[in-house]
């Protein structure tokens, strides 16, 4: 004799398990995204679907905005033009925390018709990462080229406030989860233009659109002011050192005696002895200088290997997470039980300096950090009180040290800057009042950048809360 179905007991058995019940007709009805894989139907995604069904009248399709969506196509050999022009190329790695980092963009010249598949985005457009790290949105604030791993929305065609709202909407956790969910399931997941066209957008009032756009504009204004102050600090440094608008000698021929070259440096590669480096050291010789060894202690970090990576734990910061303006959130974690945290965590006023990959990136730590850094990042702690930490960091990021890093790390497929070479890097010592002036501008710049980030998060939260309310 069969037992009657006990729905209450059945639901109790499912409690706490990652199991979703989905009607077949709901799957079949999604022609564009007919998915049977279990990952697509995780509880977190099904709850979003239920929410949208219950509030269906409060959503429209992105296609209702009538905006064109595009992406660049394959463009072989573009790397040969990197650094030879003034047009930024936005790639996936240039979109950090919802901001397009133009400072880290490769620069390209005006390209021939052979590269017409590499397309332009305009101020006011939105880019979304579709390959590699997927689902992250950025708002375009200057004309640029967009790589093939980006989908771009031509939102510059509509009211600027509306385009900013759409950017903030795509930046919410609500939208991000849907983008991640719908990415194609293959060895390297990616988003499609069709997916974005079919995306559900919350209907909101014009008053709300103007309000969140104003908050975003305030964020952007503070970010731009932050960049101007940092540029002023750089201008003071280079002017004091006679390096503003300085053009080194790029003569490809330079004659060296053996005792003044190999017997001193141990280097035989011609790139190491380019005339421009001699010009730099000649200019620096006009000022009192020290080496890094005489200014700061250098401490190495650890390289645990990818097998130690975790989805939770203590954040693991790599070179790709660090810029001269700050440290971005990382998605990689380590188990805190496996490491001596007191030894490895960056301390306030120490300087992180990259020695591998993108060498010579320096960032001064503003407060003790609860993270572990990659072995490619050295920790510099200043013991020479004649050097201000902000000043030293600015020098490290300037042409003064960047050229020395370039000289030392030349000749390798993957750039590597030896700690023994870093110790001998020459640092000019400007008078303390000038260092303090530079430091004050940098501190104000970083404070404005932090406020800009806070306002951007505030705008995103406003949109998130409006989604929770159901919009109009």
Image (cartoon, helix red, strand yellow):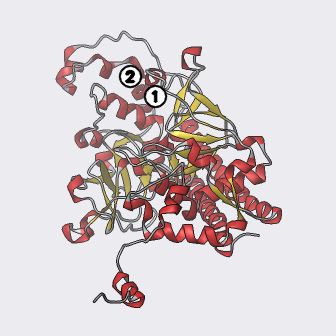
Q: Disc 2 designates what residue?
A: 278
Count neighbours of disc 2 (C-alpha within 10 A) and say few if under 14, some if 14 to 19, many if 20 or more.
Answer: some
Count neighbours of disc 1 (C-alpha within 10 A) and say few if under 14, some if 14 to 19, many if 20 or more.
Answer: some
Q: Residue at x 73, y 56 (%)?
A: 217
Q: Tell me if 18 is positioned left or right of 445 in this view.
A: left
Q: Is residue 237 visible?
A: no
Q: Which quadrant of the rendered structure holds the N terminus? A: bottom left
Residue 150: image location, x then y, percent:
53, 40
Q: Tell me if 449 is positioned left or right of 380 in this view.
A: right
Nearest to the observer: residue 455 or residue 356: 455
Q: Residue at x 21, y 19 (%)?
A: 268
Q: Disc 1 designates what residue?
A: 283
Q: Residue at x 53, y 62 (%)?
A: 26
Q: Residue at x 72, y 67 (%)?
A: 57
Circle 1: element type:
helix
Residue 69: image location, x then y, percent:
64, 39
Mark 1 or 2 closer to N-term? 2
Residue 184: image location, x then y, percent:
44, 47
């Amino acid at each position: 004799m069969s037992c009657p179905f006990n729905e209450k007991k059945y639901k109790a058995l499912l409690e706490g398990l990652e199991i979703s019940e989905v009607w077949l007709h709901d799957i079949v009805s999604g022609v564009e995204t007919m998915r049977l894989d279990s990952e697509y139907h995780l509880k977190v995604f099904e709850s979003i679907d239920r929410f949208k069904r219950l509030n269906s009248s409060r959503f429209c399709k992105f296609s209702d905005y009538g905006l064109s969506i595009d992406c660049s196509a394959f463009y072989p050999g573009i790397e040969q033009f990197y650094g030879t022009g003034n047009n930024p190329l936005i790639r996936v790695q240039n979109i950090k925390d919802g901001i397009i980092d133009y400072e880290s963009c490769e620069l390209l010249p005006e390209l021939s018709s052979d590269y017409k598949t590499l397309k332009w985005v305009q101020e006011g457009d939105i880019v979304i990462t579709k390959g590699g790290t997927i689902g992250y949105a950025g708002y375009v604030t200057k004309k640029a080229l967009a790589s093939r791993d980006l989908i771009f929305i031509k939102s510059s065609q509509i009211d600027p406030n509306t385009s900013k709202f759409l950017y903030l909407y795509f930046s919410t956790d609500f939208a991000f989860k849907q983008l991640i969910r719908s990415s194609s399931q293959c060895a390297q997941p990616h988003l499609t233009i069709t997916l974005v066209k079919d995306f559900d957008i919350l209907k909101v009032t014009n008053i709300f659109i103007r309000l969140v756009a104003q908050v975003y504009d305030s964020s952007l204004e503070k970010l731009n002011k932050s960049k101007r102050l940092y540029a002023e600090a750089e201008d003071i440094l280079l002017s004091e050192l006679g390096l503003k608008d300085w053009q080194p000698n790029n003569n490809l021929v330079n004659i060296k005696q053996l005792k003044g070259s190999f017997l001193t440096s141990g280097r035989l590669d011609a790139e190491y002895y380019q005339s421009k480096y001699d010009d730099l050291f000649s200019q620096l010789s006009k000022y009192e200088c020290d080496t890094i060894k005489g200014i700061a202690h250098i401490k190495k970090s650890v390289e645990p290997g990818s097998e130690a990576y975790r989805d939770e734990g203590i954040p693991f910061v790599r070179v790709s997470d660090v810029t001269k303006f700050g440290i971005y959130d990382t998605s990689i974690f380590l188990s805190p039980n496996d490491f001596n945290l007191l030894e490895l965590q960056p301390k306030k006023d120490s300087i992180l300096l990259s020695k591998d990959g993108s060498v010579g990136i320096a960032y001064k730590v503003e407060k003790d950090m609860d993270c572990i850094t990659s072995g490619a990042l050295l920790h510099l702690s200043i013991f020479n009180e004649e050097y201000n930490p902000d000043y030293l960091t600015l020098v490290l990021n300037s042409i003064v040290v960047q050229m020395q890093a370039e000289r030392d790390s030349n000749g390798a497929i993957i750039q590597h800057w030896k700690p023994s070479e870093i110790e001998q890097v020459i640092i000019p010592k400007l008078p303390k009042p000038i260092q303090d002036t530079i430091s004050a501008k940098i501190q104000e710049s970083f404070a404005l950048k932090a406020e800009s980030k806070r306002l951007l998060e505030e705008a995103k939260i406003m949109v998130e809360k409006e989604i929770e309310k159901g919009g109009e």
